[in-house]
Amino acid sequence: MNKIIELLPQIATAFGQTFYMMFFTLTIAALLGIPLGTYLYLIRPGSLMQKPRLYIVLDAMVNIVRSFPFLILLVAIIPFTRFIIGTSLGTTAVIVPLTICATPDFARLIEQVLLEVNRGVIEMAEAAGAGTYQIIWKVLYREARSGMVCSATLICVNFISYSTVAGLVGGGGIGDFAIRYGYYRYQPEVMVFTVILIILLVQAIQTTGRIIAQKLDKRI
Amino acid sequence: MMIRLVEIKKTYQTSSGPLQVLDSVSVHIKAGEIFGFIGFSGAGKSTLLRCINLLEKPDSGAVFVDGENLTALTKKELLGRRQKIGMVFQHYNLLQNATAFDNAAFPLAIARVPKAERRERVLQSLETVDLSDKAGDYPSKLSGGQKQRVAIARAIVTKPKILLCDEPTSALDPQTTRSILQYLKRINKELGITIVLVTHEMDAVRSICSRVAVMETGRLIETLDMSKELQPPQTGLARFLFASGAGI
């Protein structure tokens, strides 16, 4: 117990690093993933702006990035990370691979959620003279909004697991802390305490996501 | 002449080969009338209706609305014309995450009508279908008939000259069907909106249509004037439809 109290400042720092990574990763992943997912939906064969060939290419690219185990992705793109951030080490640097990992996942989830939107409502909007841009904002995002929040929640939870690996390149964060103190230094009570904190964090994210999604959903 | 369809042809490519759904269909629909299309499922009547606002693009043929050939317009011009044509669907097609008010306001938002102007027009539209008290309700709280009335309010909110109705009563019970048909009739009379009604229910045609076109396998086989009681149907299908009373 004393050990844990001694380590509280480090735990706080680790949480700070996790939130720092989470904020930037998820913001960038949302800014890239939502448009990409929407575009995938729009260019699907039979959809509003269908481009079957381009769809096959983009679809394959999304799958390829998603297939990479995160650890390998992290190492593989070190030169790219160095180019963007100036270094491949540290909390800021690890945002790059985390974002690259989260973006296609997010895009795929958004595409799936948009596919659930009733085709009839889209046809109604077309009959009302809506252009594609209006259909996206006034129909697709409106009808799919609770699903989009659920997707973001899922990405958020996945992120916490991925960010553990960030420790390898000095990224820090709560997962890395659990491994360094709990595993490498044989302090199981620190490990258990940290894991409990992570469980609470995940619960908090999941609950918040669920409440927002329910608030937005007027279907039932 | 309000709506004129000329030699409309449409073929779908299906896995079992090409399927011709419209075979050189020509129709004239006059301003102010309620014109029905009736026929069995797969006769092509819904596809033909969708050709009027070009939700469905004919392979060949021309669509004239108010003397203007819609098939010759650019995409952007077409979107503008669609804003002047209301449409009602079998399954209502309401936004689930929008209130009755916001659903009815949808075409005005699309047409970029200023917000201040929207409110009055939406309330007026909801008033027409006697749903003023449901303005704040989401569709999940409404009955089938109420949902269709919201859809009708939405379709007339832009003050269109034409209202396209695709099986508007086919998902409703007989009593609700009658009420929806009466609303359509009133809208036609009081607002002077030309209505094109696709249905497979002969009762619907009998109660509100001024003329009806009978369709079979992509062709228009007969047009009947409902106001002339004594005009006998000429084709077998038309005779069957008229004799079977309750509908198909």
Image: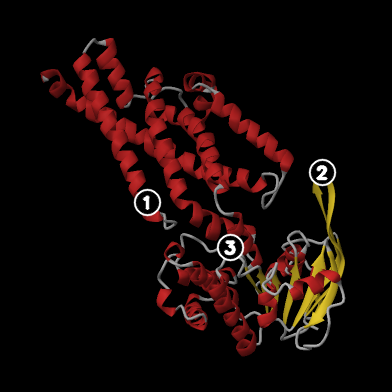
Q: Nearer the viewer, mark 2 or mark 1?
A: 2
Nearest the viewer among A12 and B244 is B244
Please report the residue visible at 23 percent of the width from the left and 10 percent of the height from the top: A186
Please report the residue visible at 65 percent of the width from the left and 36 percent of the height from the top: A58
Spatial CA span between label 2 and label 1: 44 Å
Residue position marked by numbered label 3 in the rendering: B91
Kind of residue at badge 2: Ser
Q: Seen in the image, is B147 located left or right of residue A180?
A: right
Spatial CA span between label 3 and label 2: 28 Å
Chain of the residue displaying label 3? B
Q: What x and y, as percent, mark residue A170?
A: 37, 21
Nearest the viewer among A111 and B242 is B242
Asked if A21 appears above or below A164 in the picture, the reply is below
Q: What x and y, as percent, mark residue B137?
A: 41, 68
Please report the residue visible at 40 percent of the width from the left and 77 percent of the height from the top: B133
Q: Circle 3: is it few (<14), some (14-19), or many (20+) Cα within 10 Å? A: some
Q: Seen in the image, is B243 located left or right of residue A12?
A: right
Q: Dot 3 lies on which element?
A: loop
Please report the residue visible at 53 percent of the width from the left and 27 percent of the height from the top: A83
Asked if B119 appears above or below A40 in the picture, the reply is below
In terms of image quadrants, where is residue B88?
Answer: bottom right
| Quadrant (top left/top right/bottom left/bottom right) for the N terminus of chain B | bottom right
Nearest the viewer among A125 and B130 is B130
> Does mark 1 fall on the same chain as mark 2?
no
Q: What x and y, as percent, mark residue B62?
A: 85, 69
Residue position marked by numbered label 2 in the rendering: B16
Q: Seen in the image, is A96 located left or right of residue A188?
A: right
Kind of residue at badge 1: Gln
Residue position marked by numbered label 1 in the rendering: A214
> Does mark 2 fall on the same chain as mark 3?
yes
Q: Dot 2 lies on which element?
A: loop
Q: Circle 2: is it few (<14), some (14-19), or many (20+) Cα within 10 Å? A: few
